[in-house]
Image (tube, helix red, strand yellow):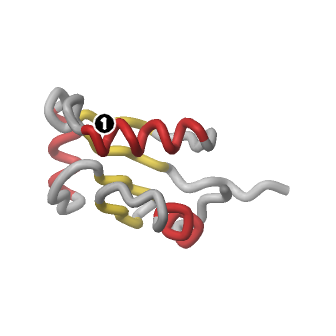
Amino acid sequence: MKTKQPRITLYSTAGCAHCRQLKQWLQQRRIRFVEMDVQRNARAFKDFQHHDGRGVPLLLVGERKIQGFNPKQLPAQLRKAGVSL
């Protein structure tokens, strides 16, 4: 039986190259996520601040925060947060 994946939220902005790279990385691996643009969406910005966001991209996996995009470290960070790759 498959275990339930934690909810994944990507806090991003339209002009952020690292955000686009992270989004593409997740999509290539068929990892489901919700994208929240912190510049265009006031609720997204409020949530981002609530999670002590310091910059984008910020990936929230369940309650675990992953700041920035480092493709070498990301698989291990996601597995730690309960995501099956």
Please provide percent x and percent y for residue 59.
37, 53
Give the vertical position of 20 relative to 83 (above or below).
above
Q: What residue lies at 19% left-to-right and 57% top-to-bottom?
A: 53
Image quadrant where residue 75 sits: bottom right
Give the vertical position of 40 relative to 55 (above or below).
above
Q: Amino acid at mark 1?
A: Met
Give the quadrant of the C terminus. Answer: bottom right
**Total of numbered circles in the picture?**
1
Q: Nearer the viewer, residue 31 or 3?
A: 31
Please provide percent x and percent y for residue 34.
43, 37
Q: What residue lies at 35% left-to-right and 64% top-to-bottom?
A: 65
Image quadrant where residue 3 sits: bottom right
Please provide percent x and percent y for residue 68.
30, 57
Direction from residue 6 to residue 54 in the image, left or right: left
Q: Name the residue carrying label 1.
A: 36
Direction from residue 77 to residue 11 in the image, left or right: left
Q: What residue lies at 59% left-to-right and 67% top-to-bottom?
A: 79
Residue lying at the far right in this picture: please name it: 1
SS of the residue under disc 1? strand
Q: Nearer the viewer, residue 28 or 53?
A: 28
Direction from residue 62 to residue 29 in the image, left or right: right
